């Protein structure tokens, strides 16, 4: 696959008067989605914590870094493929974990799995998925599993055991959401999809969970199931010491998602972790927190040589990906853009988003004189 092919396809279709169904500028997807999603679902995905200052800062941080292109470097043959934690990728772009995808489209996680598989892109399935992990696995290509570590250790063990058994190769443990933040848009609508029983499928289908509530979830015990879910979902008492237990439960790579401080990156190395995602959850957790891109340089300086550093929060364009790579990330995760793509166009909408971002990245790097990821380093950018 030539990553820039998508650009040629769009221009060729244009000769027949066919223009793309969705905007190719992924910043614009949010506006378009505003007109098409339910107001609750749109506010849920577009919204962030507090006054949404960190969400805005995440985007603005990319504006502060500028790419410095180089010329005459023979960029005719290009290859942006990478192997990240043993997973081969056509480009250093991963679908990050986004829960409750059925609020955007009836095919939810299955549509995302099909789109990702068609392009050989890795998807990360959320613990808060609206489709059970085994069902998603049956349709998915390369896949990672994101753990929201529940209070009950047996339940945690069961979730990760099921993920391993159904072929999820890397465990992504999200640390920044041991409880949901103050999110005014959701509060003002009294909207939480999980309270409506969406995003609980990995629990409903779990044998340890079912045992705790005395059997499979039915209309009769649904309220009990939701209470048990709510009591278990977040685990604010976790500490770094708990990672030793998880390390024993999971044979493959473990990635800690939500790191923003170089000291925590160091602790991840010390705890025997394989990777980290420098992320602030898209500004959905601590409003007023540092922009995720601004946290990246100190973290890669501290631990980039010892642990695989991934990045998310604010990635919308090929230039954004290039900047994160230049500042030391090995790959990026995307979140909101593919949720909008799903809501607007189902499987084809997710494919559109991925092809836009991969083609844009390829063209950005080529026009900057870089044909492989090995050519991308700190000298690509300046402030
Ligand atoms: C609607 C929505 C749901 C999310 N659900 C999860 C989740 O279940 N698990 C998780 O680790 N992160 C979740 N995230 C965070 C994303 O993985 C990612 O960190 C974030 O979207 C990055 O910010 P951006 O989309 O603005 O680039 C969610 C984000 C959104 C927008
Ligand atoms: O909304 C979120 O950001 C999120 O991570 C989440 C948390 C719980 C269930 C579903 C998604």
Image: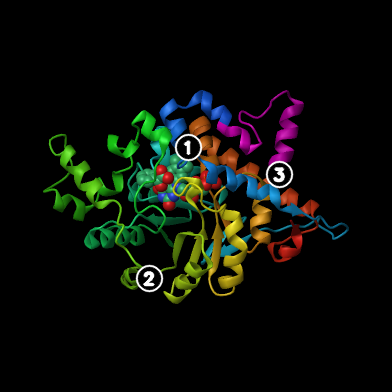
In this view, the residue in front, 191 or 229, is 191
Q: Position of residue 274 (x, y in %)?
A: 47, 70
In this view, the residue in front, 356 or 141, is 356
The numbered mark, 2 or 1, whose residue comes first in the sequence reads 1
Mark 3: C-beta under 8 Å from nearest atom of ligand 1? no
Start-end of magenta stretch: 1-30
On screen, 314 above or below 223?
Answer: below
On screen, 277 above or below 189?
Answer: below
- Left or right: 215 as drawn, with respect to 365: left
Write the residue at 85% across / 60% down.
73
Alpha-carbon distance for marks 3 and 1? 34 Å
Residue 16 can be seen, yes or no: yes
Residue density around tag 3, few if under 14, some if 14–19, many if 20 or more, within 10 Å:
few
The quarter of the picture where the C terminus appears is: bottom right
Write the residue at 65% across / 30% down.
20
The numbered mark, 3 or 1, whose residue comes first in the sequence reads 3
Q: Position of residue 298 (x, y in %)?
A: 60, 66
- Secondary structure of the residue carrying numbered label 2: loop
**Figure quadrant of residue 305:** bottom right
Between label 2 and label 3, give the one nearer the viewer. Answer: 2
Number of numbered tags placed on the structure image: 3
Q: Which mark is residue 205?
A: none
Q: Position of residue 211 (x, y in %)?
A: 14, 53
List the single residue furthest toward the right. 72
Residue density around tag 1, few if under 14, some if 14–19, many if 20 or more, within 10 Å:
some
In this view, the residue in front, 269 or 110, is 269
Alpha-carbon distance for marks 2 and 3? 38 Å
Q: Is residue 101 magenta?
A: no
Which residue is label 1 attached to? 47
Which residue is label 2 attached to? 251
Which residue is label 3 attached to? 5
């Amino acid at each position: 696959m030539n990553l820039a092919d998508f650009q040629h396809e769009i221009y060729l279709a244009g000769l027949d008067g066919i223009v793309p169904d969705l905007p190719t500028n992924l910043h614009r997807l949010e506006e378009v989605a505003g007109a098409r999603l339910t107001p609750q679902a749109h506010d849920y995905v577009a919204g962030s914590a507090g006054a949404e200052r960190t969400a805005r800062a995440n985007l603005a941080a990319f504006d502060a870094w500028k790419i410095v292109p180089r010329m005459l470097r023979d960029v005719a043959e290009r290859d942006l493929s990478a192997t990240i934690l043993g997973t081969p990728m056509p480009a250093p772009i991963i679908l990050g974990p986004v829960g409750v995808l059925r609020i955007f489209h009836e095919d939810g996680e299955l549509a995302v799995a099909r789109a990702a598989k068609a392009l050989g892109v890795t998807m990360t399935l959320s613990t808060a998925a609206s489709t059970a992990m085994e069902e998603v696995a049956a349709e998915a290509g390369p896949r990672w599993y994101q753990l929201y570590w529940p209070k009950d250790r047996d339940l945690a063990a069961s979730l990760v055991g099921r993920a391993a058994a159904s072929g999820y190769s890397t465990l992504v443990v999200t640390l920044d959401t041991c409880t949901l933040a103050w999110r005014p848009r959701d509060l003002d609508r009294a909207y939480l999809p999980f309270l409506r029983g969406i995003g609980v499928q990995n629990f409903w289908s779990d044998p340890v969970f079912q045992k705790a509530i005395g059997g499979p979830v039915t209309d009769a015990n649904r309220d009990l199931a939701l209470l048990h879910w709510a009591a278990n979902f977040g685990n604010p008492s976790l500490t770094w010491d708990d990672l030793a237990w998880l390390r024993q439960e999971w044979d493959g790579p473990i990635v800690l998602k939500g790191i923003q401080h170089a000291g925590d990156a160091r602790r991840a190395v010390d705890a025997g972790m394989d990777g980290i995602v420098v992320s602030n959850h898209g500004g959905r957790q601590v409003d007023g927190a540092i922009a995720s891109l601004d946290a990246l340089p100190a973290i890669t300086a501290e631990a980039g040589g010892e642990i695989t550093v991934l990045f998310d929060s604010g990635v919308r364009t090929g230039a954004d990906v290039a900047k994160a790579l230049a500042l030391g990330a090995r790959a990026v995760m995307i979140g909101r853009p593919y949720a909008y793509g799903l809501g607007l166009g189902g499987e084809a909408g997710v494919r559109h988003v991925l092809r836009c971002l991969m083609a844009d990245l390829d063209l950005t790097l080529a026009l900057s004189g870089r044909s492989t990821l090995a050519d991308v380093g700190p000298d690509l950018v300046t402030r």
